[in-house]
Each structure stands twice: as C-alpha cells, then as structure tokens.
Amino acid sequence: MRNIGSIFVILLIILINFACTDNSIVYPEFGSQGTLVNTQELNESTSKKLEGIYTISDGSDHFGTRAVIIANGTFISILCEMNSSYFILQAGSKDSTIYTEGYWRFAETDNNASAALKIEKSNGATDILYSDTAKNSIIISGTYISSSGSSKTITLTYQKPISKRNSDFKIIAHRGGGRNSDKLPHSENSAELMVIANRFGANAIEIDVQITKDQIPIIYHDHNFSTRLIKGEFLIGPISNFTLRQIKTFGTLINDEPIPTLEEALDSIINKTNLKLVWIDTKDAAAVASTIQIIQKYQTIANSLGKTIEICIGIPSVEVLNEFMKVEGFKNIKSICELSVQTVKDINALAFGLPWTLGTMKTELAELHSIRKKGFVWTLDEQVFIDKFLQTSDFDGIVTNYPSVVAFKYYTKDE
C-alpha cells in the first residue's frame, strides 16, 4: 500500500507540473520605447487605404517577393509569400508619417520577433492620411529582427488593389483562430483569440460548443477537461460533471484566459470584430436546443447593429441532426451540415461541410450551387492541398489553422 501511495504522489506531481506548462511563446512588447509613442491611431477608413498586393524587395529572401496587406481597425497585417510568414503591426501617424510596430512570425513554427516599419511623407503617407484619391505609389520600409537575432531591412512597394477583398469566399479560422500547437497569442477557442482572428486573414471562424452540468453551452473542443487545453489541477474529466460556476472557478484555458460561454463568445465577436460567419461545431447533441436559442438571440442583436454576419449551428452527426430536427422551425435556422447533400436539402442548411480527404467534390458542389447552397472544406493546412483546392475546386470557403496562408493564396490567385 505504501508503494502504491508513493506512485500516486509521483503521478500527481507530474500531472500538476504538466498542467502548469506554458504553451505560449513570448511576443515582443515595445512600451515607452516604441515608435508609436505620441502618435495618433489610424482609424479604420485610413488604414484600409493601405490594403493591396505589394512586391517585396529587401527581405525577399525571408518572406518571398509578394505580400498582401489587409487592415483591421488600427492594425495592418502583412501576409507574405514564403515560409507561411506574416506581420501583425499596429499603426499610427505623426508629422505626416505613418509608423507601425509589432511582430512577424512563421505560422508553422515558434519563430517570431519584433518589426517596426514606416511610410514616409514622400512615399505615400500624405495621400493616405489626407487624400481620398487613389494611391499610385506606397513604399513601406523598416527593420525586423531575423530568426538569428540580427536586424534586417524590408521594403514593400504597392502594386495593385486586392480584387477579391470583398468577395463572399470564407477564410474560416479553425478553433477561433488556430490551435494551441500553433503558439498564437491566445488559447484556441478563447474569446480573446476570436477577436483577433481577422488579423490572421480570416473573415470567418469555426468554434466548438459543449454543454455543462447546468446546461450552459461553453466553447471547448474536447469532451473532457484535461491538461492538454486547460490550467487547473481540479478541473479534470467530463465537462458534463461540472457546473459553469465550477468551471469558471477551478480552471482557465492554457494561456490563462477564462473558458468562455457561447454567449460571451458571440458577444465579443459581434461587438469587436468584422467576421462574416461563425460556424458553431456542436460537439454534444445535448447542447443543440440551448445553442439555437443563443444563436437566435445574437443573430437578432447583430442584425439590429447592422452587422453582416451569419451565425450557424453545425450538424456533424446523426445524433445532433435528430435533436436539431426536434426544434420548431428548424428549416429557418442557419446550419452547416456535414452529413450529405440530401440532408443539406432536407434541413435547408446554409452549407455542406466536407473533409478535404474527400477531394474537390465537383459534382456535389455543382448540385449545391444549383440550389444556392454553399460548400466548405475542412481542415486544410498543407500548402500543396490549399493550392490544389483554390485552383481546381469550387468550394465557397476553407477551414484552416493557417488563415494567413489561405488568405495570401486566395487574394493572389490568378493575379
């Protein structure tokens, strides 16, 4: 018995230490030393003028020869051609010069480092800040810290607008923006990650819903709490064992964010983002009825605010389908069905969600499009397959852990 007790203590220590492991990476902070000190934040209409397809000269060995710049509020994102690389930069202006600072990283590795770029008066800043006319020339230049720790220069020159920027194609960030293994600034399925998903190139997100013991839908992927996704040595086991109060008390997501309820997530999405679609993947059939009530509540709120967003319940299984069809007026509820084209028709789903392993599914997509339904493919991360599906399929959206890669490839397709 004494040996068993000793083994239990050792296992408990290992479990606690694993639970406390920090899965995040450190992102640079500038504070009072940054170039944005005493600058005026760019408003959304001004930062939008920076959007376009650019050529990269200095820095092309690291990032490729082309980049796409998109804007979200005071932030601009530079999505690059090579190494799954991107920049996330906050922008401000001072003395007719535009300054930006933030970080760059390779989406598929832990590499990230600081960057500070600017647009001089003579290189387009004056037009961007004070003119409504089209810009023929914008040059963005500055420095970034390379993977080796040395300071390098980068120069981007405006080439042309993004012709597909306002298309209906959905770049759907998996788990609210990406997985914990992707080492993003916030945990997967956190409200904090959903709020910045736009910055990675996404215009839509997929999130996961489970149900608590007291029947509250929460955003969480697995059926069980474990140290894979949370901190909190007392929050272990099936979600259905815990009330919302216990969940909020005993654990956090891996980067210390609170585990959000569906209501908290949708409130953040509607009030803090410009996302166009939310796909709520229903992991537990018991969550269907309450999830639909919350969707209807927040869709009404979004409509009243003039937000163009579709909030959809996912139908991934027959069990979820059966619960969905018990709800009065289910054909009027926006849904994304993963079962069959016929089921999409039967429940009047918005779209058919298909795994990428089924291929380009041209026949099925043609049938869907003939009845004004959409097709979304999941989950595409390998660049060779992203290229194939963008070039040869007719899907209306891609679910991915690397929205920056999909966005670059989609916006430069056929350019």
Image (spheres, grey):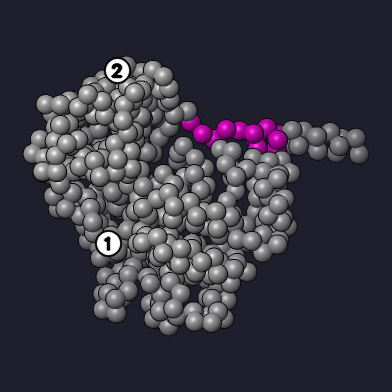
Q: Which numbered dot is residue 168? A: 1
**Residue at image point 17% right, 42% down:** 53
Asked whether, in this view, residue 232 is left or right of residue 187, the answer is: right
- Report the number of discs: 2
Residue type, mark 1 in image: Asp
Q: Along the line of sight, which residue is nearer the eye, 243 or 187?
A: 243
Task: Please tell me whether mark 2 sits on a helix, a strand or a loop.
Answer: strand
Q: Specify which label sits upstream in the sequence, 2 or 1.
A: 2
Residue type, mark 2 in image: Ser
Q: Which residue is mark 2?
A: 151
Asked whether, in this view, residue 368 is left or right of residue 215, the answer is: left
Asked where in the image residue 14 lies, by quadrant, the reply is top right
- The N terminus appears in which quarter of the rendering? top right
Asked whether the viewer can see residue 400, the reply is: no
From what the image shows, is residue 117 above or below residue 251? Answer: above
**Residue at image point 45% right, 39% down:** 184
Q: What x and y, as percent, mark residue 264?
A: 55, 53
- Identify the magenta region: 14-25
Task: Please tell me whether mark 1 sits on a helix, a strand or a loop.
Answer: loop
Q: What x and y, as percent, mark residue 410?
A: 24, 52
> Quick check: is 101 in the magenta stretch?
no
Asked whether, in this view, residue 411 is left or right of residue 284, the answer is: left
Separation of marks 2 and 1 at Cα, in angstroms: 39 Å
Q: Along the line of sight, which residue is nearer the eye, 357 or 194?
A: 194
